[in-house]
Image (cartoon, helix red, strand yellow):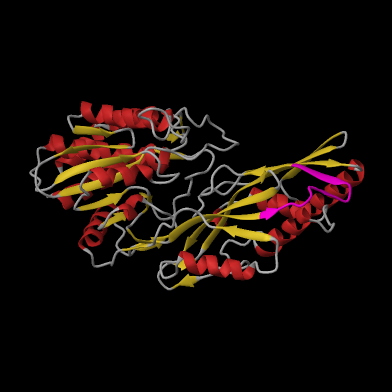
């Protein structure tokens, strides 16, 4: 396979391109003219299209929403769907999140593995196929999205203006092949506060989390207290017994409690440590009055708390195809006279958003908490294992890794594979690798980056030949 050997020659370019695109902070921001998701995502798109054009590919920018690079001939197209936007960086990084610095042969930065590194890998996989001079019967097109993490408006726009590929994969999940993805909904649980004071304690501020699809690594509450020393001593005694990562700061009669967690992807909340849950539990022993705030704290701890599968709040569904529902309290805030808790749920393939909403509403009957449905419902994806695309990608995975035992899998994550018919997720994470997506110190090792470039080149050849 001459094109595989070519990839080794690209190593320096692949690393450099990955570093450069990581340095673009492509978190969604306020829209600007021709920049529907803000300046950062647009600059990342511009960069990807620039290097694609330099490689000799035909490129197109679709009004800043998305873009593509392609080569080859034929009536059919093999697509690769990637995204260039990233979630917020969060806190606690060892290395600057937008520097692309290399330590211990790993490239660090937000988006390194989700999804900028894999995007660069597929570009150089295309370059290797083009420069090898192989005869292909299908065109190959890489499609660049710019708001996968926050709404998929990029793909909506793309498919309204462009014909979908005949088949496609997205390098934005796990190996070997993802043939099923759970449904996704984001919604709020809201409780109105008739008063923000109770037993000499006044709620001033409450906030936590960066995005619904991230396990929050930070949450804090500010209280104005008539007897701060009594509260302080009670809190310190409780936290000492629990050994929780929560700190208290006292400034006259103002108390600030800050809880720290460990971020993870919202599809796998059990892999992180939720700072909101730590904060709510820490407050439970210190706020024991009869008020709306106390009621909310108690309900949170009893029905949500450190449970990850919705089992305490009426939606603990599971099936034989995709397993248990995933329940992530991603953000919390005091919004005027109400507490707003934003939930990210990944429901099983055989379940539905309606079933989840109905179950939660039934569970919340008689409480002061109201469920406010989100705007969207990302339906589950299921592609049979005997589908041509799944079978061909499994052949490539086995040939490139020697792993002959694994079968296609299902996940809770949501990828661009749902944006069209006949698409699946394929990599980039290998079985057993640490999951660093959406976490501090996100990285991709150079060895990993080179390996997936070869796998994607092989996959594109097999699908396009």
The residue depicted at 92 percent of the width and 43 percent of the height is 227
199 in the magenta segment = yes
- The answer to whether residue 111 is left or right of residue 391 is right
| Residue 357 x/y as whole percent | 53, 65
The residue depicted at 53 percent of the width and 31 percent of the height is 95
The residue depicted at 57 percent of the width and 46 percent of the height is 263
| Residue 9 x/y as whole percent | 23, 32
**Residue numbers of the magenta segment:** 191-204
375 in the magenta segment = no
| Residue 392 x/y as whole percent | 21, 58
| Residue 2 x/y as whole percent | 15, 40
Q: Nearer the viewer, residue 464 or 305?
A: 305
Direction front: furthest residue = 194
Please indicate, yes or no, whether residue 426 appears anywhere in the rendered image: no
- The answer to whether residue 191 is left or right of residue 416 is right
Please indicate, yes or no, whether residue 445 appears anywhere in the rendered image: yes
């Amino acid at each position: 396979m001459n094109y595989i050997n070519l990839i080794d020659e690209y190593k320096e370019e692949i690393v450099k391109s990955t570093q450069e695109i990581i340095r673009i902070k492509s978190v969604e921001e306020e829209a600007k003219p021709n920049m529907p998701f803000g300046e950062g995502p647009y600059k990342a798109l511009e960069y990807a299209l620039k290097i694609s054009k330099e490689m000799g590919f035909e490129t197109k920018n679709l009004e800043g929403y998305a873009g593509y690079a392609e080569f080859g001939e034929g009536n059919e197209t093999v697509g690769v769907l990637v995204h260039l936007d990233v979630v917020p960086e969060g806190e606690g990084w060892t290395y600057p999140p937008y520097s692309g610095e290399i330590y211990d042969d790993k490239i660090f930065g937000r988006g390194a593995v989700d999804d900028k590194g894999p995007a660069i890998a597929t570009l150089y996989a295309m370059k290797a196929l083009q420069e090898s001079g192989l005869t292909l019967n299908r065109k190959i097109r890489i499609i660049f999205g710019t708001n996968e993490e926050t709404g998929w408006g990029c793909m909506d726009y793309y498919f309204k203006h462009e014909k979908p590929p005949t088949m496609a994969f997205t390098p934005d999940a796990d190996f070997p092949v993802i043939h099923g993805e759970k449904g996704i909904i984001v919604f709020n649980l809201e409780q109105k506060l008739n008063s923000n004071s109770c037993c000499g304690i006044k709620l001033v501020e409450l906030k936590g989390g960066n995005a619904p699809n991230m396990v929050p690594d930070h949450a804090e509450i500010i209280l104005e207290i008539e007897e701060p020393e009594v509260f302080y001593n009670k809190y310190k005694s409780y936290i000492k017994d629990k050994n929780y990562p929560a700190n208290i700061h006292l400034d006259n009669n103002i108390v600030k409690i800050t809880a720290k967690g460990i971020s993870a992807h919202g599809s796998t909340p059990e892999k992180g440590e939720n700072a909101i849950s730590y904060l709510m539990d820490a407050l439970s022993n210190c706020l024991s009055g009869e008020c709306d705030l106390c009621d909310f704290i108690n309900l949170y701890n009893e029905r949500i708390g450190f449970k990850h599968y919705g089992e305490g709040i009426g939606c603990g569904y599971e099936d034989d195809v995709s397993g248990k529902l995933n329940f992530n309290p991603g953000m919390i805030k005091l919004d005027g006279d109400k507490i707003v808790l934003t939930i990210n749920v990944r429901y099983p393939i055989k379940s539905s958003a309606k079933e989840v909403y109905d179950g939660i509403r039934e569970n919340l009957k008689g409480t002061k908490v109201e469920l406010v449905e989100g705007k969207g419902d990302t339906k589950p994806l299921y592609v049979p294992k005997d589908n041509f695309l799944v079978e061909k990608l499994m052949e490539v995975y086995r040939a490139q890794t020697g792993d002959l035992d694994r079968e296609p899998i299902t996940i809770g994550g949501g990828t661009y594979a749902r944006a069209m018919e006949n698409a699946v997720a394929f990599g980039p994470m290998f079985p057993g690798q640490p999951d660093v997506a959406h976490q501090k110190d996100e990285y991709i090792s150079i060895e990993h980056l080179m390996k997936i470039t070869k796998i994607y080149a092989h996959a594109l050849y097999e699908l396009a030949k």
